[in-house]
Image (tube, rainbow, N blue to C red):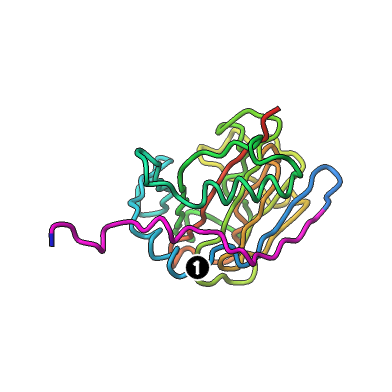
């Protein structure tokens, strides 16, 4: 065998299901969409995700916590990932615009997070409250988070906030749960995605010790509507 097929990423695994179920939530200040049954074959996509190595995105010691990201970017013809065009058409459908007016980076991107319960007091703090403006400062930025673990305990998911003032006394991004109340929360479920305005502050919703015992996986995608 010239190449171990177990190490080759099957990009076709990342194909959006034609039978997705979409729900719309109008928060007044913005709209949020949830998509159930996102991938045609979630287990296949899960296994392919694990082939992509992770690199840390924050300074971590790999003992108390790990915050990392893995990415595959198209670099040549005939290595296209179906997600790129599928996601373009999904955003165009939700925004009621021509798909040609939607720009989507040609890549697949995953986040990974695991922590020691003594390092992160999830009863008192939210972790990594942020906007996606660092990715692209665009008024029509659409962000997606897709939940890629095989199961989730009740209380795990995503928070969306109306505003957040960074507390600079922390060297790592913790925000007081007493200080910031989410305006929308989503209970994570395998193969479920949420799409929202990337300008809105958001964070992982971590209220259990599940991800002190296993890695938290999520896929993230971005799109913007050309003006």
Residue at position x 51%, y 37% from top? 171
Residue 87 screen position, x and y as percent: 59, 49
Magenta highlight on residue 20: yes
Q: Nearer the viewer, residue 41 or 140?
A: 41
Residue 202 screen position, x and y as percent: 66, 46
Residue 183 screen position, x and y as percent: 78, 51
Residue position marked by numbered label 1 in the rendering: 42
Q: Quadrant of the C terminus?
A: top right
Q: Which residue in the rendered view is the most extreme toward the left? A: 1
Residue at position x 70%, y 42% from top? 197
Q: Nearer the viewer, residue 110 or 24?
A: 24
Circle 1 Cα neighbour tier, 10 Å, few/some/many (<14 / 14–19 / ≥20): many
- Left of 137 or right of it: where is 33? right
Residue 13 screen position, x and y as percent: 44, 61
- Magenta-colored span: 2-25
> On the image, which quarter does residue 140 sit in?
top right
- Left of 175 or right of it: where is 209? left
Q: Nearer the viewer, residue 167 or 55?
A: 55
Q: Nearer the viewer, residue 172 or 76?
A: 76
Residue at position x 34%, y 56% from top? 9
Q: Which residue in the rendered view is the most extreme toward the right? A: 28
Magenta highlight on residue 8: yes
Residue at position x 49%, y 52% from top? 82
> On the image, which quarter does residue 225 sit in?
top right
Q: Relative to 175, does residue 1 appear above or below in the rendering?
A: below
């Amino acid at each position: 065998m010239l190449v171990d097929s177990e190490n080759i990423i099957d990009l076709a695994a990342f194909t959006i299901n034609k039978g997705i179920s979409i729900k719309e939530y109008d928060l007044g200040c913005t709209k949020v969409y949830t998509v159930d049954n996102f991938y045609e074959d979630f287990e296949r996509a899960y296994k392919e995700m694990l082939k992509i190595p992770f690199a840390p995105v924050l300074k971590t010691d790999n003992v108390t916590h790990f915050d990392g990201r893995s990415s595959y970017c198209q670099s040549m013809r005939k290595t296209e990932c179906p997600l790129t065009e599928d996601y373009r058409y999904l955003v165009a459908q939700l925004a009621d615009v021509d798909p040609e007016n939607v720009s989507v980076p040609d890549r697949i991107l995953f986040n990974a997070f695991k922590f020691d319960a003594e390092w992160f007091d999830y009863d008192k703090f939210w972790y990594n409250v942020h906007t996606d403006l660092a990715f692209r400062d665009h008024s029509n930025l659409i962000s997606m988070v897709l939940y890629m673990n095989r199961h989730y305990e009740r209380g795990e998911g995503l928070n969306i906030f109306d505003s957040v003032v960074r507390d600079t006394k922390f060297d790592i991004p913790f925000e007081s749960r007493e200080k910031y109340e989410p305006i929308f929360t989503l209970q994570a479920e395998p193969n479920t995605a949420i799409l929202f305005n990337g300008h809105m502050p958001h964070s992982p919703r971590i209220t259990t010790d599940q991800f002190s015992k296993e890695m938290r996986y999520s896929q993230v995608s971005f799109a913007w509507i050309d003006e």
